[in-house]
Amino acid sequence: MRKMKIFLVLEIVFSFVCFLKSDLVFPQEVNLLIKNVSTAKAVAFNPLKGEQGIISYTVVNPCIVRVRILAQKERELVLRTILNWTERQVGTYQEIWDGKDSSGNIANPRKCNIVVEAQPLPPFASKNSTIFKLVNVFRRISIFSRNYYPSSFTNSNDHNHSSKNGYSIDQKLCLLRPVQFDQMGITDEVGLHMHNLHDPVKCRELSVKITSLGTGVVISGSYQLTAELQGGINQGYIPEMGSGARWYIDNKLVFEDENANPPLYTATLDTTIIPNGEHSLSISICDHRDHRGTYAIKVIIQN
């Protein structure tokens, strides 16, 4: 144990010496990217009357922004992505939601969470940037990497709230140590949500469709469900990381497969444990890099 402590101290000293001899410039910390996030007008409107929801926020440092609609109590179920990591300069912005999910179904805004996230522009955190090189010099010293990947997070439960220091709740884990790379891209688990480090071609939402039945179909007993990846298998990080699939009834998880085999996703639904009547059937897939695709239809269960 004593030898390990001595080794760690020597490693820290060596890292400092390397840093002092390098031409790296210690970057300024970005404390806040967005503020004044308001989702009150996005959860208190009636889409059946043609009304629209408004999500507003102020960008205080140039960044990339994502706005998502999530089902309440199911953080993995993304009903729709309104804005997908789009560059925003300093200023005040409004995003409009028509109250529909990604399949065109009318959602109940009062049962949705609005999630607004922000990350620094890609050059700030790219693997060729000063900060990435600096982090690698101190790759074993978490204190020097903990504050350089800020993000902002809010949801409809906090209508006028921006998180302290601009950090995302889900991304605090990503701040603990440097992100590692190989030739395929990000491989370190803490880099899952660092979209400013993702390949821009791969940093997109996925596309999936339920193919075993259409909307309004009557089903009963044990029913085999099938969904298919749309547009080919080369979406997001699926070729490198594979994908997971979750099936939902009325936005409640009923089946999960973390190692699904695209392009087909299958599950067996026991309808006998579900009340008769009309229900929402959804599938949500992910590429294990925080890119998702969702599809939903209405089905009628009759046993």
Image (cartoon, rainbow, N blue to C red):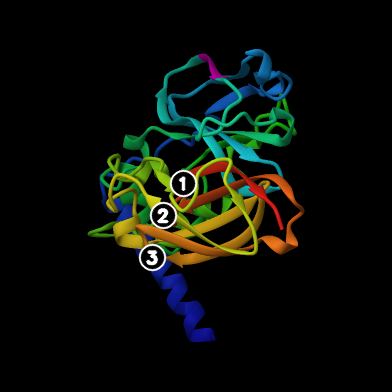
Please rate how many residues cluster around mark 3, counting C-alpha atoms within 10 Å: few if below 14, some from 14 to 19, many from 20.
some
Q: Which span is picked out in magenta?
A: 92-96
Badge 1 amino acid: Arg
User: Which comes before the other along the chain, label 1 or label 2?
Assistant: 2
Of helix, strand and loop, which one carries label 1? strand
Q: Is residue 183 left or right of residue 163?
A: left
Q: Which residue is mark 1?
A: 292
Residue under label 2, please give it: 287
Q: Residue at x 57, y 28 (%)?
A: 100
Q: Which residue is mark 3?
A: 261
Q: Residues within 10 Å of mark 2 (few under 14, many from 20)?
A: many
Contact? badges 1 and 2 (CB < 8 Å): yes
Say what amino acid the circle numbered 3 marks.
Asn
Tell me the CA gap for discs 1 and 2.
7 Å
Secondary structure under tag 3 reads loop
Quadrant occupied by the C terminus: bottom right
Residue placed most toward the observer, 199 or 217: 217
Q: Amino acid at mark 2?
A: Asp
